[in-house]
Image (tube, rainbow, N blue to C red):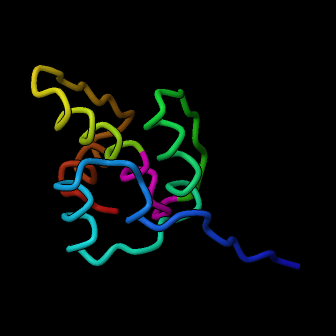
């Protein structure tokens, strides 16, 4: 049997800057995917994450939301995102979920 994942959070629950939260909600995102639900709160607390999930499950947003939040909080901060393939870099640049 397959157990359906029940999220612990909604995007509105994440402790991110109001500007970021408003933009996430404005895009129509309400309930995070399982990888986002588990990773985002952990990363926001400063923890490290190694996440494995299928294509299209929201891994990009799982790491970008906490990074963007940190960049908003400290405009002197910068981020370098390294990915293994050109296709993934293009997906991230487009903002695919």
Residue under the image location 54 percent in, 39 percent down: 42
Image check: 78 left or right of 67? left
Q: Position of residue 83 (x, y in %)?
A: 35, 34
Residue under the image location 32 percent in, 48 percent down: 16
Residue in the foreground of this view, choosing between 64 and 89 = 64
Name the quadrant containing residue 20: bottom left
For the view shown, which residue lies furthest in the right direction? Answer: 1
Residue in the foreground of this view, choosing between 70 and 61 = 70
**Can residue 57 be found in the magenta stretch?**
yes
Q: Position of residue 84 (x, y in %)?
A: 39, 33
Number of numbered markers: 0
**Can residue 46 be found in the magenta stretch?**
no
Residue under the image location 59 percent in, 61 percent down: 34
Residue under the image location 38 percent in, 50 percent down: 60
Span shown in magenta: 55-62
Image check: 78 left or right of 4? left
Image check: 3 left or right of 73? right
Q: Position of residue 80 (x, y in %)?
A: 24, 25
For the view shown, which residue lies furthest in the left direction? Answer: 75
In which quadrant will I find the C terminus?
A: bottom left
In which quadrant will I find the N terminus?
A: bottom right
Q: Position of residue 54 (x, y in %)?
A: 57, 58
For the view shown, which residue lies furthest in the top direction? Answer: 76
Q: Is residue 66 above or below residue 56?
A: above
């Amino acid at each position: 049997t397959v157990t359906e994942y029940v999220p612990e959070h909604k995007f509105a629950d994440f402790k991110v800057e109001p500007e970021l939260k408003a933009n996430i909600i404005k895009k129509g995102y309400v309930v995070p995917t399982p990888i986002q639900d588990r990773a985002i709160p952990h990363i926001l607390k400063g923890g490290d994450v190694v996440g494995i999930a299928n294509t299209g499950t929201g891994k990009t947003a799982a790491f970008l939301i906490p990074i963007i939040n940190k960049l908003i909080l400290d405009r002197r901060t910068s981020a370098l995102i390294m990915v293994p393939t050109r296709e993934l870099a293009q997906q991230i640049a487009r903002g695919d979920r």
